[in-house]
Amino acid sequence: MADERTKQVGAFLARQGILVAFVLFMIGFALANHRFVAIDNILGVVRSSAILGVMALGVTFVVISGNLDLSVGSMMSFSTIVVLDLHDKLGPALAIPAMFAMTLALGALIGFLVGYLRLNSLIVTLGMLSAIHGLTLTYSGGKNMDIADKAGTWFGGIGRGSVLGIPGPILIFGLLALVLGVTLAKTPFGRKVYAVGGNGTAAIFSGIPRARVVFMTYLVSSFCVATAGLLQASRSLGSQNTVGQGLELEVLAAVILGGASLLGGSGTVFKTVVGVLILGFIQNGLLLVGLEFYVQYVVTWIIIILAVWLDVAAKRGRILSPIA
Amino acid sequence: MQKDTRARLIKDGAIWGFIVLELIFFSVAGHFLSLSENAFMDLENMLLLLKQSAPIGIIALGMTMVMINGNIDLSVGAIFALSAVVMLDSMGWAVFAPLGDWVIPISWALALLTGMALGAINGLIVWKTGVDAFIVTLGSMLGFRGLVFMYNGEQPTFHLNWTMVDMAQASVFGLQTPSLVLIACTAIVWWILNKTIHGRNVYAVGDNREAAVNAGIRVGPHMMINFVIIGFLAALSSVVFYSASGSVNPNDGMLYELWVITAVVLGGTKLTGGKGSVIATFGGVIAIQLLRKGLGHIGADTAMVSLVIGSILIVVLYLDKQLNRKGAEDLKL
């Protein structure tokens, strides 16, 4: 009986552990520094997490379908550079769709390689990380990209403006999270993504076009990357061509923290958002307590391991791994 | 049967064939395109190439073991940096001041111990928690990098010791220390993988973990030893490199994991474990360095290098899949 109860508590913690941890964190930091829960601080944290968050939304789809996407960082640099460059050549109204089309084309290429040719996603996206980096450098000629007339364009309004006091990036992040969350949880496509990640063979036998579903997840991911690039470009109005470097692993950390399994088949958009916010608030909280920015790396490390360990332990019903 | 042998020969020889192709291409193309007077394939250039391959190459040897084992290690870049910080910082410690130049071997030992300890942490977590190595080392990649920063803030750590620089740049038959270390390590890791019980277990565990457990292999400690080995090799790579340069930035070694994995995969080692060869990894390391140098020789910029290496990685993956295709496995996902 007591065993039963321990199991139930364990199962609850495994399902909602990340939320519990999140709440505990917020309370802890709030007690340490009152400024932490001030509304402008919270808005600031969410705004600065938005770019990472938007990318994490797309990667959630890819991870649930049982694949990885390590190319999002360098793809984000690409879309940022492209939109900044085209802004001066075509004007913002044309530059944005053109950039989306180019980024989606890259996503389609990856989707084709992983979905239809069934190549290992880790290596394909590792290769694409390098290839897209090269593409970006070639495109920009190795130079930083700047918008010539920064004051006279509405382009900056997307990343810098706000509606009813809510900053633009938060609005876009929230809207995208809502749309993608509903897509994943409530539509046939979303169910297929879970099916393909949960058991690919079974999915094929039940008539789900695995290749097309995987292809679509990479399109979703590249769409999110393009959005992130747009936010980055419009917030800074100028950029280095390595702006997204290393983000792919931070994005993955947020998705994993949200409880998506790398084996595929589990995870939700909502939990990914929580994962992103946890990373953002930890960073902010540690800074407010007076610690250096790099302390967050160590804290993130410990939290990721504990979160995944809790998840794995609850599933197998014991804390330590049974392997001898 | 004969067809099988031929397919195997193509696969095993592929990386060397690729290297030969690169050599021919860059020699011919260099003749027309290069601004430099020197031939691409001159001895000095090739020796330099070997030396430049060493930092990535030494780590790639350990990565081969870990990947044959069915795991992966994303934290090698951070281990590389932290070992260097420990080595260069410890040389200035007051405790060691009376030792004079004898501080060098002690600092080296401290750096290597750091690498082994970090590897042991990874291995222990993988063993005891049962969390996938990809996630564990993704976490420690961040965590170890954090430790690098916490050690010395955002400042570079430096200590120049001319005796040490001389040792790092000593040469035998034209081969400098880094090249010698790379070759020696390749030989040792080859010996471990092919001639020892531990090596046989590396393949067994990677091929089928269940079966390995049933055969009585203690999989947990076994995997931990491999993580200690890759930690050691990452630290050794760092010792070789920073003994010559004498200064490390806290961001050094970032993205090394990606370069290393690229080299290992080019060498034909499977991510799923069970297959792979350290000699082929050596080939993969040389092939990448050759590509970087060759493209530089014919006047291409770094952008082109990234583009080409990324594309080649994907093409190799595709060809490998075609060569390995068997009717029964077609539906395997």
Image: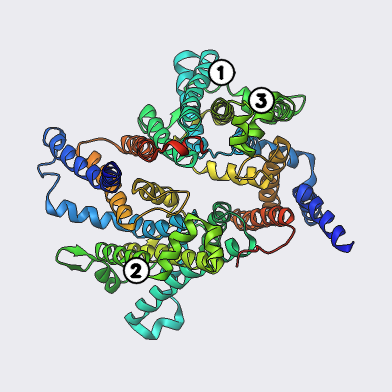
* Residue B73 appears in the figure: no
- Residue A189 - label: 3
Q: Is residue B21 above or below residue B235?
A: above
- For marks 3 and 2, give the one nearer the viewer: 2
| Front one among B268 and A253 | B268
What residue is at 79 percent from the left and 52 percent from the top? A11
Crowding at dot 1, Cα within 10 Å, few <14 / some 14-19 / many 20+, comes out as some
- Element carrying mark 2: helix
- Residue B195 - label: 2
Amino acid type, mark 2: Lys
Tag 2 subunit: B
- Residue A66 - label: none
- For marks 2 and 1, give the one nearer the viewer: 2
Picture quadrant where residue A43 is located: top right
- For marks 1 and 3, give the one nearer the viewer: 3
* CB atoms of marks 2 and 1 within 8 Å: no
Q: In this view, does A247 lie to the left or right of B44?
A: right
- Element carrying mark 1: loop
Tag 3 subunit: A
Q: Is residue B23 above or below residue B191?
A: above
What residue is at 38 percent from the left and 35 percent from the top? B318
What residue is at 66 percent from the left and 47 percent from the top? A257
Percent of width and height locating residue B133: 55, 55
Q: Is residue A17 left or right of residue A169?
A: right
* Residue B197 appears in the figure: yes
Q: Is residue B324 above or below residue B135?
A: above
Tag 1 subunit: A
Q: Are marks 3 and 2 on the same chain?
A: no
| Front one among A117 and A102 | A117
Gap between marks 3 and 2, in whole Å? 51 Å
